[in-house]
C-alpha cells in the first residue's frame, strides 16, 4: 500500500514519540562523548514539529517533510539540527509533488536524505556519526524497493540496517563532530546521532506497518 500524506504525518508523530521516550537515553549517550544535549535537542525540535501538524503544511508528503525540515533547522540547534533538517529537506525535494509514495519513492527519499547529511557534514561511513546508521539503511531500503517491497517493508529493512549500523559505531573512534575532540577516548560508546537515526527509522517503520 502506498504512503499517503496522513501516513507521513503519522510517521512524523511516531518519530516525535520515540524521541521523547528515548530522550534521556540519547542525552546519556551524548554525555559520554559529547555535551549531553542530543536527546533534549531532538525532543525540543520534534515537539515543535508536532505542534505545527494539523496546519497548512498537511497538504502533500513533501509539504509535511519540508515543514519538518524547517522547524528542525530552526529549533534543534547543535550539529544534529541542520543535519536532520537538511535530510528532511532533501527528502521533500525528492518526493516532489506526489500525493502518495510507493516503495521506490520512500527509498529515494531516504537516499536523498543521506546525500543531504553527507553534503552538509562531510562524514563518511566509519566516522562514528549518524551516517553509519543512515548509509546502510539506504542500501537496505533500495534493495527492498528493487525487489518489489512497499513503503512499510522498505522502512522495516531500513530500520533493521540502521539498528545494526548504530551498533557498529561502538568500537569506532569519532572523526567528525564534538566526539572527535576526544580522539581514542570516543571508542567504546555508541554514537548518539546514529542511535537517534535508528530510533527514528524504527518508529517510521512501526507506524507504516500499523497503518498498512
Ligand atoms: P552537538 O554535537 O552540537 O551537541 P548533537 O549532540 O545534537 O549536537 O548531535 C551530535 C550528533 O551529530 C553526533 O552523535 C553525530 O551523529 C552527529 N554529527 C555530528 N557531526 C556530524 C557530521 N559532520 N556529519 C554527520 N553527523 C554528524
Ligand atoms: Mg550534543
Image (cartoon, rainbow, N blue to C red):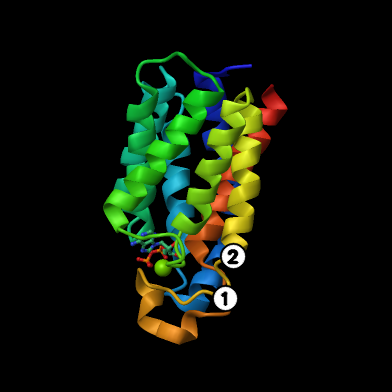
State left or right for residue 1 relative to residue 127.
Answer: right
Q: Nearer the viewer, residue 208 or 78?
A: 208
Residue 100 visible in the picture: yes
Residue 16 visible in the picture: no
Quadrant in the rendering for residue 201: top right
Check if mark 2's residue and mark 1's residue have beta carbons within 8 Å. Answer: yes
State left or right for residue 47 relative to residue 94.
Answer: right
Name the disc covering residue 188, or none.
Answer: none
SS of the residue under disc 2: loop
Residue drawn at x 48%, y 24% as measured from the top left: 105
- Where residue 48 appears, as percent x and y from the top left, is 42, 43
- Where residue 53 appears, as percent x and y from the top left, is 45, 29
SS of the residue under disc 1: loop
Residue drawn at x 35%, y 69% as measured from the top left: 177
Viewport quadrant of the N terminus: top right
State left or right for residue 143 relative to residue 56.
Answer: right
Q: Nearer the viewer, residue 131 or 18?
A: 131
Viewport quadrant of the C terminus: top right
- Where residue 30 appears, as percent x and y from the top left, is 49, 71
Check disc 1 and report the residue beneath it: 171
Quadrant of the image where one finds ligand 1: bottom left
The residue lying furthest to the top in this view is: 99
State left or right for residue 56 relative to residue 169.
Answer: left
Residue drawn at x 58%, y 79% as measured from the top left: 188
The residue lying furthest to the bottom in this view is: 185
Check disc 2 and report the residue beneath it: 168
Amino acid at each position: 500500500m502506498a504512503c499517503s500524506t496522513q501516513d507521513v504525518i503519522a510517521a512524523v508523530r511516531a518519530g516525535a514519540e520515540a524521541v521523547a521516550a528515548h530522550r534521556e537515553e540519547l542525552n546519556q549517550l551524548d554525555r559520554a562523548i559529547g555535551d549531553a544535549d542530543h536527546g533534549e535537542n531532538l525532543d525540543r525540535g520534534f515537539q515543535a514539529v508536532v505542534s505545527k501538524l494539523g496546519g497548512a503544511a498537511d497538504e502533500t508528503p513533501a509539504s509535511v517533510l519540508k515543514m519538518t525540515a524547517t522547524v528542525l533547522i530552526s529549533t534543534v540547534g547543535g550539529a544534529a539540527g541542520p543535519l536532520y533538517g537538511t535530510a528532511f529537506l532533501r527528502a521533500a525535494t525528492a518526493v516532489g509533488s506526489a500525493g502518495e509514495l510507493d516503495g521506490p519513492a520512500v527509498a529515494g527519499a531516504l537516499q536523498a536524505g543521506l546525500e543531504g547529511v553527507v553534503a552538509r557534514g562531510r562524514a563518511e561511513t566509519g566516522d562514528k556519526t549518524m551516517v553509519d546508521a543512515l548509509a546502510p539503511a539506504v542500501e537496505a531500503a533500495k534493495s527492498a524497493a528493487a525487489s518489489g517491497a512497499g513503503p512499510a517493508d522498505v522502512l522495516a529493512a531500513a530500520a533493521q540496517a540502521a539498528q545494526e549500523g548504530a551498533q557498529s559505531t561502538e568500537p569506532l573512534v569519532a572523526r567528525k563532530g564534538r566526539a572527535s575532540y576526544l580522539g581514542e577516548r570516543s571508542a567504546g560508546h555508541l554514537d548518539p546521532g546514529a542511535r537517534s537515526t535508528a530510533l527514528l527509522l524504527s518508529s517510521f517503520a512501526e507506524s507504516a506497518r500499523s497503518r498498512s
